[in-house]
Image (cartoon, grey):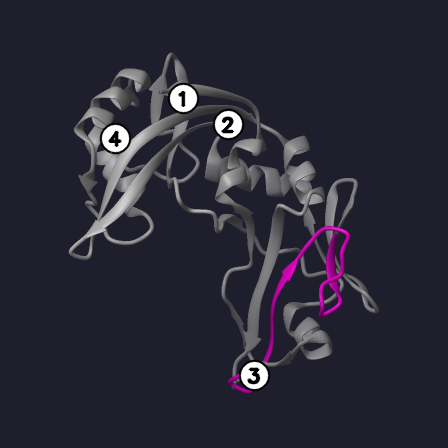
Amino acid sequence: MLKEIDVKYAMREIDIKGFFPTLRDGDTGIGYTLEETWGIVENNVGEPDLIYKGIPVELKAQRTSATSRVTLMTKTPHWDPLGPKEIMEKFGYKDKNGRQALKITLYLDSFNKKGFKLEFNHDRLNIVHRTGGILAYFDVQELMGKLHEKLYENLLLVLADNKRINGKEYFHYKNALLLTHLSEDAFRKLFKEGLIVWEFRMHIKENGSVRDHGPGFRLSRLHIKKLFDNSQQIYP
């Protein structure tokens, strides 16, 4: 059973206490430390973390200072008409290790230096090459389903200042936003604004097989709230 939390009260309590030492090293420490502090049990992807005012929400914590892109989700396209190996053999290049590879970032409606771009066509998001045309595609409804698994329908976004003392990271949780109604229209809009990108990270191994590093849709941490129709400041 999900724990019901009065977020405004809970935020006030941890804000007063100041900096908390991380309970797990690495990027995920900020979220894990908050969950442990609030007594939330880690769950499977696609499930909410808590109840706030009768609404089930996913909890996500971010460092206030972070501006780099984060992975919204990893998703492999439908390789049609070409497979990943064919694409790399035809349009790729030799990486620093001498392997045929493609490690590129794709934007909507704008070709990158390697001649690739993304293009919406109704219910499809196509991977297009300047001379090769459509090489593969994503089903938009499948993408939204995957995004719902990662972010859920409603998201509680908690921001924290961070610092390091003797190599250990500490967090001061100071700000909470409730984001509701994950939006396909917003998803498309962020693509058109160049804020969501797709990163292709693959190479061909010596044995001829494809090494897939997890192609991912990425968005700046600063813009996650734009994926939702509504934003409400909970604390302070």
Could you say which disc has been placed on residue 40 in the image?
4
Q: Assign the N terminus to one quadrant of the image.
A: top left
Q: Rounded to the nearest whole Å, what is the CA distance between mark 1 and mark 2?
A: 9 Å
Q: Spatial distance from mark 1 to mark 4, Cα to Cα?
A: 13 Å
Could you tell me the amino acid type at mark 2? Answer: Glu
Confirm or deny contact between disc 1 and disc 2 (CB under 8 A): yes
Label 2 vs 3, first from the N-terminus: 3
- Residue behind mark 3: 99
N-term-proximal mark, 3 vs 4: 4
Residue at the far top in the pictured view: 53
What kind of residue is marked 4?
A: Ile
Residue at image position (21%, 22%) is 13
The answer to whether 131 is drawn above or below residue 224 in the figure is below
Q: Give the labeled residue for mark 2.
A: 153
State how far apart marks 3 and 4 are (Cα): 45 Å
Q: Are marks 1 and 3 in contact (CB under 8 Å)?
A: no
Q: Which residues are magenta?
A: 96-118
